[in-house]
Image: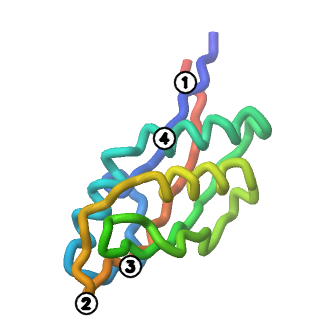
Amino acid sequence: MNKLMILMLLVVAGCAVKHKRGANVDAVIETYRQNKAATETCYRQGLKEDPALNGKITLAWKVDTAGKAKNAQIMKSDLANSTVERCLLDHLNSLTFPVQAKFSPAMVEYELEFTQSKHR
């Protein structure tokens, strides 16, 4: 019997922080990583629409002085799935990141790679 296992490669396993700037940016990335379950949920929603869905998405955002994501956007996506993209942006905007200094806000571009594999 085949089981579908969802694999999501995160930064530790191969995704990349494409660009980062700011005093607390590493803490911002760690906050995002700690909340990866919601990212996986977004991908699962997309798989319901397209069982063969896979690809990369690059998210970009700035963290303000209150620790909220600002100007969150999809910089690049080869998933071409608006359900996943909207879900990822909603999730990103719901997070509270470490507070940033006024003079050095965190600015991040973060690439996620979504793949699936069948295991027997």
Quadrant of the image for the C terminus? top right
Q: Which residue is mark 4?
A: 38
Q: Which residue is mark 2?
A: 103
Query: Which element is circle 2 on?
Result: loop
Q: Position of residue 117 (x, y in %)?
A: 58, 35
Q: Which mark is residue 107?
A: 3
| Type of the residue with mark 2 | Phe
Q: Which mark is residue 119?
A: 1
| Type of the residue with mark 4 | Ala
| Type of the residue with mark 1 | His
Closer to the chain start, of discs 1 and 2, is: 2
Query: Which element is circle 1 on?
Result: strand
Who's the residue at 53% across and 69% down the image? Answer: 72
Q: Quadrant of residue 20?
A: bottom left
Q: Which mark is residue 14?
A: none
Q: Are marks 4 and 3 in contact (CB under 8 Å)?
A: no
Residue 43 located left or right of residue 16: right
Closer to the chain start, of discs 4 and 3, is: 4
